Image (tube, rainbow, N blue to C red):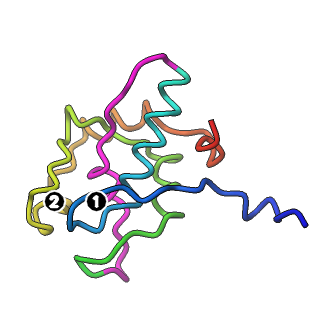
Amino acid sequence: MELPKSLNRPRLPPYNQRSIPACVAHATAANMRYFWLAKTGKIIQFSPRFLDILSWTEDLDLNDGRDPDVVLELARMVGCCTEALLPNDTTLPIERYRDRSIITSEMMAEAYTYRLKNYYWASI
């Protein structure tokens, strides 16, 4: 039996992010690195912290994990900035790691240049 195409989504592995519940953003940023390496031949250090901060929704508490669909949609619609603009310091307390006020227009502009066309990029 073949799965419906609607369920054919990337299989994102968990990544070690210490005690911060940002594994979805870490996995997405890692898969984005693979995609852009294949596309450009360059390793781009995407910031999982950027995706983690932007993927907060009102139904989540500070320590809650993120919805993979929301993070993937952000990667497609917004993109992801690099660690040069937003370092991924997992030693920060969670309230500083997830501080939405640190997102700048420069980060958003850079992220937009690294948008994904669809969700099927993880199979590269």
First-in-chain label (1 vs 2): 1
Label 2 crowd (10 A; few <14 / some 14-19 / many >=20) = many
Pick the front one: 88 or 112: 88
Q: Is residue 104 left or right of residue 23?
A: left
Q: Residue 28 in magenta?
A: no
Q: Secondary structure at mark 2?
A: helix
What residue lies at 21% left-to-right and 49% top-to-bottom? 103
For the view shown, which residue lies furthest in the right direction?
A: 1
Q: Position of residue 68 (x, y in %)?
A: 49, 64
Q: Quadrant of residue 108?
A: top left
Q: Position of residue 67 (x, y in %)?
A: 46, 69
Pick the front one: 43 or 51: 43
Q: Which mark is residue 97?
A: 2
- Where 71 sits versus 45, above or below? below
Q: Secondary structure at mark 1?
A: helix
- Where 80 sits versus 49, above or below? above
From the image, give the main secondary structure of the stretch colored magenta. Answer: loop
Q: Is residue 74 left or right of residue 106?
A: right
Q: Position of residue 22 (x, y in %)?
A: 31, 62
The answer to whether marks 1 and 2 mark residues whose Cβ atoms lie closer than 8 Å is no
Q: Quadrant of residue 82?
A: top left
What residue lies at 12% left-to-right and 68% top-to-bottom? 95
Q: Is residue 13 left or right of residue 21?
A: right
Q: Which residues are magenta?
A: 40-60
Q: Which mark is residue 53?
A: 1
Label 1 sits on what residue type?
Ile
